[in-house]
């Protein structure tokens, strides 16, 4: 929790750059003589531009950043215009929720534009913006996006030298079987319920419940992932409120110390987002408390209301993933593990071709894809390994599956290095071992998955030449695949991993 690795100090640099970008955006708004509401809107717009744009190339990041106003400005206009018309405002908010989640089907760009559209509606509720403020809100957001873009692409172009990690393509599907479509209906249903219950708690601060639902559905794909993320959001909010009571309330909105602490919170949001959602929510909650202090409305009861609204949103999200087009943790786990195993199969098939003399055979691309898929498998299995999961056998099995897939990835990397060596050549034992590995994968992904063991060659193989080295890696793959085929002992059925 406290010493998470930061290779190349990428999180540190990204968080520092975010503080600079947000601070400059707010300073520009203040120098233009804009209101406090507009300055806060601009700062949040800069934060979102730096946080949500995660395209794989710098060129795509620039395009997405340039498209943010197209997604945000119309929503900003609708939200301010409908501010006093409750039924129309609520219907428009739910429409933005559905469209924002549905847009994730178009990858990182759709994801970023959807978040930016939603947050523009949310910000107007947070600041109680009205139509008369719309021109200066447009000005603040436009200046903030220019400032954030200049900071990111000119002043400190981190991604030019260290591009963001690629993400595997989403699971296939069409209609309601497409994960993003299903999640759009789930998020909208949860938001509608949160909106109704949230308004019963507070006519002014109901939007926190809807905001909780929105962010719980970000980067989740199964019932287990959503429930765990909801728990972490509530936990981080509780700790953040405690810190807010100790820090934000005594400040009474004093500008200089509040600005310094907001900058620290921005740093915390960016620095912890990749490793701990709870820590990120702590930083978000403290930042919100400080902003309320600047607006002159902060008191302990307001923080208590935020906790209650957050709890309502988390509960509504939980109900939605259980009763509205549910996707079980098992189904998600199984789909991603199958994808990883199919990638092992493809890598082995390419290695077989190369070892048989085909110069076009190359397992390297599949080995790289396997690393990406393993990251998604870990995310899918994370709910099973949560400390609050009462099923110890399934928790242990989930850990074992991750270890075995890591073994597969290591052996595939070793196989890649072997077949890339021109000395390696065809050998009957190599071909036989490759065929056994391919058969093992097919057995694992068959309909009766887990009922059949996978034969392992066993024995020790001396690493005397390239052929023997290849056999070592293939036999390592066989052993890992054989262990993956073992069913979970405490489960009445034989899934790949109990969930």
Image (spheres, helix red, strand yellow):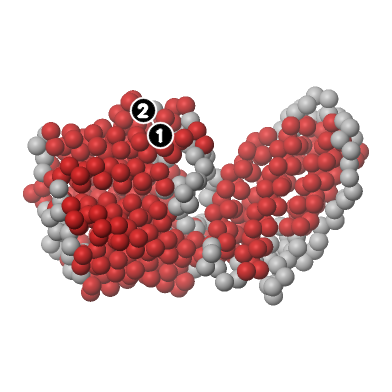
Query: Around disc 1, counting alpha carbons within 10 Å, would you say few (fewer than 14), some (14 to 19), or many (20 or more)?
Result: some
Q: Quadrant of residue 241?
A: bottom left
Mark number displayed over residue 13: 1
Which quadrant of the figure has residue 324? bottom left
Q: Secondary structure at mark 2?
A: loop
SS of the residue under disc 1? helix
Picture layout, residue 15 above or below residue 101:
above
Q: Residue at x 49, y 68 (%)?
A: 326
2 displayed left or right of 206: right
Relative to 419, say whether 250 is above or below.
below
Q: Which mark identifies residue 156?
A: 2
Percent from the top left, x then y, of residue 16?
Answer: 35, 36
Say whether disc 1 or disc 2 marks the residue closer to the N-terminus.
1
| Residue 80 shows in the view | no
In the picture, measured across the screen, residue 388 lies left or right of residue 127, that is right
Eyeballing the image, is 82 above or below 488?
A: above
Q: Residue 305: percent from the left, percent from the top? A: 24, 67
Picture coordinates of residue 148 (x, y %)?
29, 34
Give the label on residue 43, or none. none
Mark 2: few, some, or many residues within 10 Å (few <14, many ≥20)? some
Q: Residue at x 53, y 50 (%)?
A: 170
């Amino acid at each position: 929790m406290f010493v998470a690795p930061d290779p190349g100090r990428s999180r540190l640099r990204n968080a520092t750059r975010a503080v600079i970008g947000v601070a400059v955006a707010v300073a520009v708004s203040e120098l233009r003589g804009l209101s406090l509401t507009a300055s806060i809107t601009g700062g949040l717009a800069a934060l979102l531009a730096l946080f949500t744009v995660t395209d794989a190339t710098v060129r795509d990041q620039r395009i997405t950043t340039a498209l943010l106003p197209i997604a945000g400005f119309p929503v900003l206009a609708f939200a301010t215009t409908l501010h006093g018309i409750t039924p129309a405002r609520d219907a428009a908010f739910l429409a933005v929720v559905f469209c924002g989640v549905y847009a994730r089907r178009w990858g990182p760009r759709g994801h970023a534009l959807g978040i930016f559209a939603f947050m523009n509606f949310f910000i107007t509720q947070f600041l109680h913006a009205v139509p008369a403020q719309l021109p200066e809100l447009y000005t603040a957001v436009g200046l903030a996006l220019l400032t954030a873009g200049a900071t990111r692409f000119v002043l400190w172009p981190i991604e030019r030298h260290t591009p963001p990690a690629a993400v595997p393509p989403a699971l296939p599907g069409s209609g309601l079987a497409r994960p993003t479509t299903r999640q759009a209906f789930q998020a909208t249903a949860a938001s509608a319920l949160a909106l109704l219950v949230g308004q019963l708690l507070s006519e002014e601060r109901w939007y926190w419940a809807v905001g909780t639902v929105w962010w719980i559905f970000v980067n989740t794909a199964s019932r287990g992932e959503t429930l765990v993320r909801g728990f972490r959001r509530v936990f981080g909010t509780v700790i953040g409120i405690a810190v807010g009571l100790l820090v934000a309330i005594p400040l009474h909105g004093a500008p200089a110390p509040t600005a310094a602490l907001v900058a620290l919170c921005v740093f915390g949001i960016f620095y912890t987002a990749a490793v701990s959602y709870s820590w990120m929510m702590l930083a978000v909650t403290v930042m919100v408390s400080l902003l309320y202090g600047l607006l002159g409305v902060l008191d302990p009861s307001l923080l208590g209301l935020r906790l209650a609204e957050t709890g309502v949103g988390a509960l509504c999200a939980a109900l939605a993933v259980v009763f509205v087009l549910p996707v079980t943790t098992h189904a998600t786990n199984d789909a991603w593990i199958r994808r990883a195993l199919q990638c092992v199969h493809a890598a082995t098939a390419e290695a077989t071709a190369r070892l048989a003399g085909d110069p076009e055979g190359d397992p390297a691309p599949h080995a790289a894809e396997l690393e990406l898929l393993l990251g998604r498998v870990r995310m899918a299995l994370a709910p099973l390994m949560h400390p609050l999961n009462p099923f110890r056998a399934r928790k242990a099995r989930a850990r074992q599956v991750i270890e075995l897939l890591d073994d597969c990835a290591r052996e595939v990397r070793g196989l890649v290095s072997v077949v890339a060596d021109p000395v390696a050549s065809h050998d009957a034992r190599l071909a036989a071992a490759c065929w056994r590995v391919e058969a093992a994968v097919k057995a694992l992904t068959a309909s009766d998955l887990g009922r059949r063991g996978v034969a392992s060659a066993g024995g020790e193989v001396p690493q005397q030449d390239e052929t023997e080295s290849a056999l070592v890696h293939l036999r390592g793959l066989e052993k890992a695949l054989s262990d993956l085929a073992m069913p979970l002992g405490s489960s009445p059925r034989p899934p790949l991993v109990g969930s």
